[in-house]
């Protein structure tokens, strides 16, 4: 299928579902879109029993979309930049140690807890897998996605400090999670020898390299923005920074997500204050808000449709249900350990551990990474479990976190 046809179908579905949700369902946009796409997917499955050619067409349509490349090599850079652009660096600086620990130590701890528990659970199911592949699953499911809950947090009147922690952690743990996944993946496939020095080298080049590249490209873009006063040109410069910077990071074998987040923070704060006129600020904000809304609409429609590529087995379904509990437990432990450690140095909002645990919604990155797993690395069972965790976290956690926040802070 032609690329334009794929884009046209996805945009049309996103527009129709957005209209239906806004007019009738009235759920938060991303949640409503994914729910609508899920309903459509199940209708396709049912109709496929009577019209096999219709189901085959839907399957071929999804097969023509490389979800992993579409998200990780296309949409992710724009989504991360749009998110970073609106993070207040002063607010983030006040929470830097908490956000930093949650996005690094928290993700690593969650990866190992999840991977270890899954390793023993699979053995109980009579489907033993190498421990390294179980860690891969832990790495891909540990990053959180703030998109579905940030709007709800604001509506619920969550403390600003808590909102900053969740948004900041999610922006950085996407990059850290992908780095950890790539490191474990390279070790699992034998691309690198498993030694302390090789792991450290990969970690430093990906993470530190991404930060340095993001600062460098962000600073160059800042100087260019400062030298002109034309919002059309300045919007194009931010687009070049986001797309070109991500491609350059991949070429240099550094972390594209981390580079884009760092650059976005620099432009969204220093650049906004000293390099943009009021007209430019207003137009750049509107442009990136629109990009964010459109890409998220398409992303959550895609997540809903991906149910058509899953391998349905009773064992996989039961494992997926248990995996939901494992991931929530891992999130709870990693958050608790981090906050209890930081509690010595600073105070936290009432019920911070509960809210941060329940607001840890998983999204498209987890699905994309699961789709990149090798067949002999438990791809089918891990993809099913990932999908169930993502759907549960978006529909159940996303729709109940507001009540939890209101109940906790009241």
Image: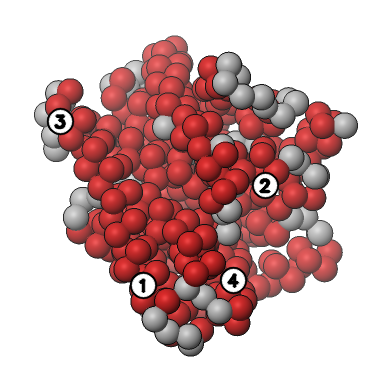
Where is residue 324 drawn, in percent x and y?
58, 28
Q: Please indicate whether residue 15 sits to the left or right of residue 374 in the image.
A: right
Alpha-carbon neighbours of circle 2 within 10 Å: few (<14), some, or many (≥20)?
many
Q: CA distance from mark 3 to mark 1?
A: 37 Å
Question: In this figure, which residue is indicated by the disc labeled 3?
Answer: 198
Q: Secondary structure at mark 1?
A: helix
Question: Residue 223 bears which disc, if any?
Answer: 1
Q: CA distance from mark 4 to mark 1?
A: 19 Å
- Determine whether 46 is above or below 378 in the image: below
Question: Where's residue 3, x and y in %?
Answer: 39, 76
The tag earlier along the polypeptide, 3 or 2, is 2
Q: Earlier in the sequence, mark 3 or mark 4?
A: 3
In this view of the protein, which residue sits in the foreground, 121 or 224? 224
- Specify which label sits upstream in the sequence, 3 or 1: 3
Viewer-side label of 2, 4:
4
Mark nearer the viewer, 2 or 1:
1
Q: Which residue is mark 2?
A: 149
For the residue carrying disc 3, how many other residues have a C-alpha within 10 Å: few (<14), some (14-19), or many (20+)? some
What is the quadrant of the C terminus in the image?
top right
Depth check, front residue: 204 or 93: 93
Query: What separation in Å lies between label 2 and label 4 (alpha carbons)?
Result: 20 Å
Q: Quadrant of residue 241?
A: bottom left
| Cβ–Cβ under 8 Å for marks 3 and 1 | no
Q: Residue at x 72, y 29 (%)?
A: 349
In this figure, which residue is indicated by the disc labeled 4?
285
Residue depicted at x 58% and y 74% = 281
Image coordinates for residue 185, horizontal then vertical, percent: 26, 36
Q: Earlier in the sequence, mark 2 or mark 1?
A: 2
Q: Is residue 206 above or below residue 128?
A: below
């Amino acid at each position: 299928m032609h690329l334009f046809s794929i884009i046209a179908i996805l945009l049309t579905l996103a527009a129709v579902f957005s209209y239906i949700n806004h007019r009738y369902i009235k759920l938060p946009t991303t949640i409503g879109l994914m729910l609508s796409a899920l309903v459509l997917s199940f209708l396709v499955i049912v109709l496929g029993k009577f019209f096999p050619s219709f189901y085959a067409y839907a399957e071929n349509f999804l097969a023509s979309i490389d979800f992993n490349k579409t998200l990780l090599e296309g949409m992710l850079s724009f989504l991360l930049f749009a998110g970073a652009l609106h993070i207040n660096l002063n607010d983030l600086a006040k929470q830097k140690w908490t956000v930093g620990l949650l996005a690094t130590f928290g993700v690593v701890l969650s990866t190992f807890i999840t991977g270890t528990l899954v390793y023993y659970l699979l053995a109980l199911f009579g489907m033993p897998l190498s421990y390294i592949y179980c860690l891969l699953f832990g790495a891909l499911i540990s990053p959180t996605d703030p998109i579905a809950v940030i709007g709800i947090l604001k509506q619920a009147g969550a403390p600003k400090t808590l909102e900053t922690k969740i948004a900041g952690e999610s922006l950085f743990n996407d990059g850290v999670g992908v780095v950890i996944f790539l490191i474990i993946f390279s070790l699992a496939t034998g691309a690198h020898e498993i030694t302390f020095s090789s792991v450290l080298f990969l970690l430093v080049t990906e993470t530190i390299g991404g930060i340095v590249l993001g600062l460098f490209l962000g600073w160059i873009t800042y100087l260019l923005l400062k030298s002109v006063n034309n919002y059309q040109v300045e919007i194009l410069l931010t687009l070049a920074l986001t797309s070109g910077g991500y491609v350059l990071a991949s070429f240099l074998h550094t972390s594209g997500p981390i580079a884009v987040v760092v650059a976005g923070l620099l432009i969204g704060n220093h650049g906004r204050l000293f390099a943009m006129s009021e007209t430019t600020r207003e137009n750049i904000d509107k442009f990136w808000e629109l990009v964010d809304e459109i890409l998220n609409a398409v992303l959550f429609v895609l997540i809903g449709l991906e149910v058509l590529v899953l391998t349905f087995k009773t064992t996989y379904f039961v494992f997926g249900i248990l995996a939901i509990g494992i991931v929530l437990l891992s999130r709870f432990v990693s958050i608790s350990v981090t906050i209890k450690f930081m509690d010595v140095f600073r105070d936290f909002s009432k019920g911070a551990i509960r809210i941060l645990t329940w607001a840890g919604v998983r999204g498209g990155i987890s699905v994309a990474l699961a789709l990149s797993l090798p067949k002999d690395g438990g791809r089918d069972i891990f993809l099913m479990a990932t999908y169930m965790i993502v759907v549960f976290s978006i529909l159940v956690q996303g729709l109940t976190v507001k009540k939890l926040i209101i109940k906790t802070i009241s």
